Amino acid sequence: MDNTRMVFSSIIFLFYFLPAFLIIFAGARFSKTTLLVFSLVFYAWGEPLNIVVLLVSITMNFMLGLAIERGRPSGKHRFWVTIGISANILSLVVFKYTNLLLETAIAALGAAHLPISLHITLPLGISFYTFHAVSYLVDVYRGDAPAERSLRDLAVYIAMFPQLIAGPIIRYKTISGELHRPLVTVDRTAEGIRLFVIGLSQKVLIANTVANPTDAIFGLPPSQLSSSLAWLGLVCYTLQIYFDFCGYSNMAIGLGRMIGFTYPTNFNYPYSAQSISEFWRRWHITLSSWFRDYLYVPLGGNRGSAIRTYRNLLIVFLLCGLWHGAAWTFVVWGLVHGAFLILERIAFGRALRAVPRPLRHGYTLLAVAGSWVLFRSPSLESAGSYYAALVVWGASATSAPPLHRFLHADVMLALAVGIVAAIPVGSRLVGWAARGLESAGAMLAGAAELSCMAILMLLVSMSLAAGAYNPFIYFRF
């Protein structure tokens, strides 16, 4: 990730941008113009040229929304929504998939190179704001929401900085009311701060800590990758990707709450799922529900024959994989999840429901974590080498570094806390402690919560001040 980009877990955002924004936003009586200006500054901080792509997208979709609504009486709204969806998807394809298409063409032709050479950079957050734009056009087409009459307000919906670059994916119809009348209160602001601090802690104290051994182990050549190291790297990455993205989502939801918007929940303890189907009801909820409502259902969903349902599932998860990245590893990752969902709809699913919960949980964790190898590996070849190290349990590798080199005290602590926090037992422990404090008095409970938030912020600040590793996995999507 380019270090010039502004991220929520950076010193410049936490101690300069965010305080300045909140002060000016409150002083301007929660002006949406202020929110839009700061959002564009936030985006332009790391994308000074690609902000043009964002602004063109906003303007184009504003005009298309009006054309769809005006074309409804004459029946031309279908034409305009088709144009709108095609234009948005074409933009995504050009910027995100041109390089993959060229590489595939080179391989198919057996040529060393093609006579053309393109170096197209991926605009930050284009996958997310394109899906926001498509949902807006479809909501207007379906009559679920009126077309936006204010270019500024549509720009706020698409470009507001808390959700601009990594979600959650917000439907226009669910936020249009708050878009015109944001609700900012002391209680909502306090809740937003709490969610933001929790997300920031998940990101900095857990995800960033386990990211170091993850990168080191996945970067080892096959000759140095023992099975024990491979499993350690996989456990670390399984926790890293969850707390990285869940932490970002919680920060975004918290920021949205502070400025008057209610963003949907994006994660609900996905690693506690008992099947892959349940996993996708808990993981990146706004993306999976987007694909369900705007692609799976229009394709026919499960209303036709079993074969058509399986086809629809494979199409959806093929595109889900491509949405995550322009590489064959993501394509295979998506197809693997689609295949598991199909298996769970046939005899295997009935057999799975008959086994004890621990076995169902173990199957789901193994399938999800195993698929993360594809997600993390730079190529199918490297993923194959990693799988080989995983499945040959106890295998050694020549010149393999010792396991303890990666298990520093902070990593072991992050792993322990991450495992507990990734399942509902962590939430229940916090709930029990909160109820115990409340029984001793509301003032004591409030003081304890405030102290916990202050301690977490102190630990986060110390980590960031030390220049700790601070990537965001989903920024590349």
Image: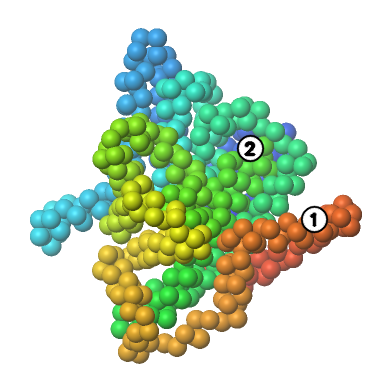
**Residue 121 in view:** no
Q: Secondary structure at mark 2?
A: loop
Q: Residue furthest top?
A: 74
| As drawn, 412 above or below 374 | below
Tell me, yes or no, if residue 431 can be seen here: yes
* Residue type at numbered disc 2: Phe
Q: How is the image coloured?
A: rainbow
Vertical arrangement, residue 155 with respect to residue 362, above or below: above
Q: Residue at x 58, y 67 (%)?
A: 418
Furthest residue in direction front, as rendered:
354
- Can you tell which quarter of the image residue 384 is in? bottom left
Place of residue 336 in the rendered image (x, y in percent of width and height, measured from the top left): 32, 56
Q: What residue sits 61% from the left and 52% below the top? A: 251
Q: Is residue 258 toward the left or the right of residue 290 in the image?
A: right
The residue sitting at 45% across, 44% down in the picture is 287
Which residue position is annotated with label 1?
435
Nearest to the observer: residue 217 or residue 310:
310
Picture coordinates of residue 394 (x, y %)?
38, 84
Residue corresponding to mark 2: 261
Q: Is residue 76 above or below residue 52?
A: above
* Residue 151 numbered tag: none
In the figure, residue 152 lies in which quadrant?
Answer: top right
**Residue under the point 75% across and 38% down:** 185
Q: Is residue 231 above or below residue 308?
A: below
- Looking at numbered disc 1 in the image, what kind of residue is underneath it? Arg
Residue 447 in the image: x percent, y percent? 84, 58
Q: Marks 2 and 1, how far apart in space?
A: 28 Å
Q: Secondary structure under badge 1?
A: helix
